[in-house]
Amino acid sequence: MGKDRGLQRQIHVACRDLGLDEDTRHDLQLAVTGKASMSDMSDADLRLVMSALKERGFKTTGKGAFKGRSKPLAPRADLRFIHVLWKQLGDAGALERPDRDGLNAFIRSRFGGKWQFVPLDVDALRDTAQINAVIRALKDMCRRHGIELE
């Protein structure tokens, strides 16, 4: 009997959007279903976990809700500012990889040795000091490339 892989992916997305790390997700799953691992859960268990995430504020959206975007806007203004700075650098031709993957690779290479944990995606950052460090680094890059900051 196959598991609903789409629902498992949606749980991972919801946890990322809510800022829940893997340990917190496992704790939630254990509290809701009595099982810490999704591989041990039935589809009904997965739906219970999804309901619990919705109760904690996760909002699902229908197809096309992001008006052509492949990903929703970042959940916080400071994270959106990181995307704006990266786009300005990309538009100025200062980047080899001006896409989201390039931004994530930049953060991993620049801060991977300094931080204990570097998320796979910039929008999963929650530590204000880390976010500010990324903004400072991008502002410095903008200045070096003569990009006017507003």
Image: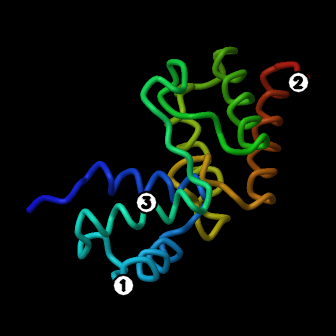
Cα–Cα span, label 3 and label 2: 41 Å
Using a 10 Å C-alpha cutoff, classify the residue at mark 2 as few (fewer than 14 neighbours), some (14 to 19) or many (20 or more): few
Q: Secondary structure at mark 1?
A: loop
Q: Nearer the viewer, mark 2 or mark 1?
A: 1
Q: Mark 3 sits on what residue?
A: 50
Q: Earlier in the sequence, mark 2 or mark 1?
A: 1
Q: In the rendering, at what x and y percent does residue 62 appear?
A: 45, 32
Residue at left offset 57%, top offset 25%: 98
Sequence order check, earlier mark of 3 and 2: 3
* Separation of marks 1 and 3 at Cα, in angstroms: 14 Å
Q: Earlier in the sequence, mark 1 or mark 3?
A: 1
In which quadrant will I find the C terminus? top right
Residue 142 occupies which quadrant of the picture?
A: top right
Q: Cβ–Cβ below 8 Å for labels 2 and 1?
A: no
- Name the residue beneath numbered marker 1: 34
Mark 2: amino acid: Leu
Q: Does dot 2 land on a helix, a strand or a loop?
A: loop
Q: Front-most of 95 and 52?
A: 52
Residue wearing tag 2: 149
